[in-house]
Image (cartoon, helix red, strand yellow):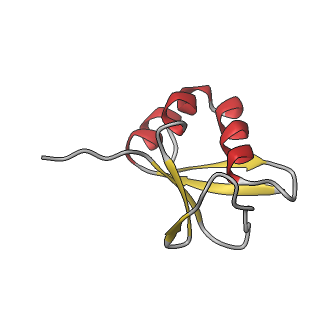
Amino acid sequence: MNVRVLLFAGAREAAGADAVQVDVPADADYARLAEAMAAQQPALSELIGRSRFAEGTRYVAPGDTIDPSTEIALIPPVSGG
């Protein structure tokens, strides 16, 4: 299946885009999505390991199955002060 992943902050800058399309198997989980994204977008590979995926308005675990009907986002770590 092809999923669209929204990117924010440093992830957007690293990829040079607001979103990426990633092909994963139909029963893929978020760990598999992370692997596929890192392979497709090497500039994101280090950041992906420190980021969280969100599906709609909730964070998901690496073992959660992807629901392609919802909005998926990669949320990088944030800092502030």
Quadrant in the picture for residue 68: bottom right
List x then y, in percent, for residue 17.
52, 43
List x then y, in percent, for residue 43.
54, 27
* Number of marks: 0
Above or below for 52 versus 13: below
Query: Residue 56 vs residue 66: left or right?
Result: left
List x then y, in percent, for residue 75.
46, 52
Which residue is more in the foreground, 14 or 81?
Answer: 81
Quadrant in the picture for residue 3: bottom right
Quadrant in the picture for residue 67: bottom right
Q: Which residue is drawn at 69% across and 60% down?
A: 64
Which image quarter holds the N terminus?
A: bottom right
List x then y, in percent, for residue 8.
43, 50
Q: Residue at x 54, y 33 (%)?
A: 44
Looking at this view, name the residue that lies furthest to the left: 81
Q: Which residue is drawn at 85% across and 58% down?
A: 27
Query: Residue 26 vs residue 33: left or right?
Result: right
Q: Residue at x 66, y 57 (%)?
A: 4
Looking at this view, name the residue that lies furthest to the right: 26
Which residue is more in the foreground, 1 or 35?
Answer: 35
